[in-house]
Image (cartoon, helix red, strand yellow):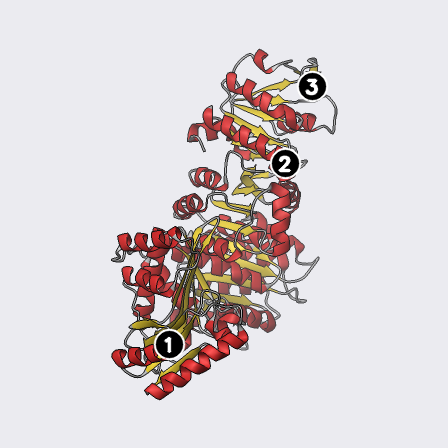
Amino acid sequence: MQSNTNFHSLLCPDSIAVVGASRKPGKLGHLIVSNLIRAGYKGKLFPVNPAGGEILDLPVISAIKDLPTPPDMAIIALPRDKVIGAMKELAKADVSAICVITAGFRETGRDGFELEMAMADLARRKNITLLGPNSLGLINTHCNLNATIAQSIPQKGAIAFFSQSGALCSAILDWADGEHIGFSKFLSLGNKAGLSEADVLEALGDDPETKVIIGYLESVDDGEKFLRKARMVTEKKPVIMIKAGTTQSGARATSSHTGSMAGSVVASSAALRQAGIIQVHDLEALFDLARSFAEQPLPQGPNLTVVTNSGGPGILAADACEDAGLHLARPSQKTLEKLTEALPPFAAIYNPIDIIGDAKADRYRATLEAVAVDEFTNAILALLTPTASAEIEATAQAIIDVAEHCEKPIFACFMGGERIGPGRDMLIAAGIPCYAYPEPAVRAIEAMYAHYQWLNRPYPVEVCFRRDKGKGKQVIRKARKVGLKELPFSDAMDMALAYELPIPETRLVRTSDQAVRAAKKLGYPVALKIVSPHIANRGDVDGIALDLHTPREVRDAWLDITTRTQRKRPDAYLAGCLVQTMGPIKAREVIVRFTQDPQFGPLISFSLVGPSAEVLGDIAYRLAPLTLQDAQDIVREIKSFPLLRGARGEDPVSLAAIEDILLSMSQMATDFPEIQEAELNPILVDTEGAMVTDLRLTIG
């Protein structure tokens, strides 16, 4: 983004030129002018068309050079090959911002890509804020601006939305109109030749009319910039996003849609998490959360109180609460006394508070008033099923009245169909989220509490580990000089030493006699491991022998390993074997890896060795550079973490030792982007510390 001033010219222009305006209804150039007029745009509007005349009672300017004054913004709706020429003329006319509706650029192939790059270059050189191409346009409800080709005009609200998909924008505008969801800003990014998602995030973060930012992402062009800007914005307001292209088919569709790479799914998810962005996986959840964040205060704790007139939905809410990591609040003694006085004897006054099926609005009101001031309650969920006694609209009004004087978030769940419709409409109009089922309501409360925790998290501590970067450069230079992509084990160990990774004493040997002498020098017991540049996983050839105590065992192991490897992989060159001192006997085996993601840079993963990771996918991910909190979180995030903490009476392992290795690898990944992949496998960790027994490094 060129400047905030230019962004203001885009979103709240005092004058607009529509280049390619048309008199024919149905044409894009006609629809844009029509939408601007229908929305009540107050600024100057200049339709531009060589034919002249009038369009919708506005005088038409025959050429850009004839514009009476430089417009703040121009909207281009011309055939593809005429767009660059129009942009050059607009640049001469000192236009600050341009929105290009026209499609057919990089998403169509090389010719379109080259045209788009020319557009981007022109915008950069002339300091023009460029939206698009292939954009639906933009909306600012707070200054009556609808510069889109969509049919619907949204209501005014506090939610800002941006998307790479123009067609999705049209569908969402139509759906939001029926759901009475209001927007502050609405932007279709298109191919992002100019403004990117990071630029838009930054501007919306500073927008006083926007309380919540939501977005649809297909790709991220500059991952580091996106992370930096997103972290700044999520400190001010919630950001909720849905990421498309999370499957192989979706990634292919993304490329053909906007010409963008969808990128690694785990990398993008890690990026959103580390930036404090709330990721959802469907559009319904996106707007459910947006409305909740826009209309309710954040819960300042995990304790939820559920009020219901039916036991079943209350149990469903309790189950959802436990799944979400929230807690059912235990009411204070004072609250219990109020509930005992207000409710019939058969009511359940402990959470969930079941006020039983004959409850009318007055019973809901008394119960909600009691829990609204309960010191142990952080959020309230009012459940209603349409029983014969239920007073739908009166109950909705009771919830609204209590919410007016309550500083805690209040959510409603009115289950049913036609009968509950009027009550649901009342709640939504009053700014109280109303759900059809308990589970999405609880997930919304969980997301809001997670954002509260993000805002109140400890300041991130960045760690710079001691390392010999010069020695690391020598290792990389040596490998490049001889054209190696995978570093030999000795060089990989030199890199490990440069980063002070804990490695065992190791010798590379080429004969069984050398193996015996090395074992004697290192001290028994030892391990023997096959070495070949063609074998990535020694387990595939059963090329490891452990806990060898005598020269005879070393010789036998040498013969077994080399013979077996030659039989299974006759194509592989055998460089010899490694003799290593044995690591701790009662140790857990873990893996630390990193790869270079094309969009976000180094992606670090952590898992246990074995089927939990290989088969069940129990792997945690973060992007480098890691903070101390990131290193702690990635270890604790895997489902098999209890095994490291000590399960069934076993001793816990040294988590600090694992975290140190993660931080060292983060430093290495950041220092050397030319390292495409690194793997420490396995790392043996026990109560005393950790030992890296094998390291593979691949350079690009």
The local secondary structure at tag 2 comes to loop
Q: Amino acid at mark 3?
A: Ile
Among the two numbered marks 3 and 2 on one chain, the one whose residue lies closer to the N terminus = 3
Distance between mark 3 and mark 1 Cα atoms: 89 Å
Distance between mark 3 and mark 2 Cα atoms: 21 Å
Q: Amino acid at mark 2?
A: Ile
Q: Amino acid at mark 1?
A: Thr
Locate residue 191: give its quadrant: top right
Q: Residue at x 34, y 76 (%)?
A: 579
The local secondary structure at tag 1 comes to loop
Q: Is residue 297 visible?
A: no
Residue 504 in picture, x, y percent from top left: 30, 72
Residue 130 in picture, x, y percent from top left: 52, 30
Label 1 sits on residue: 511
Relative to 570, residue 622 above or below: above
Q: Mark 2, residues whose alpha carbon is within 10 Å: few (<14), some, or many (≥20)? A: many
Depth order, front residue of 17/634: 634
Of the two numbered discs 3 and 2 in the rendering, the one whose residue sits closer to the viewer? 3
Which image quarter is the N terminus in? top left
Label 3 sits on residue: 55
Q: Residue at x 36, y 52 (%)?
A: 672
Q: Mark 1, residues whose alpha carbon is within 10 Å: few (<14), some, or many (≥20)? A: few
Label 2 sits on residue: 153
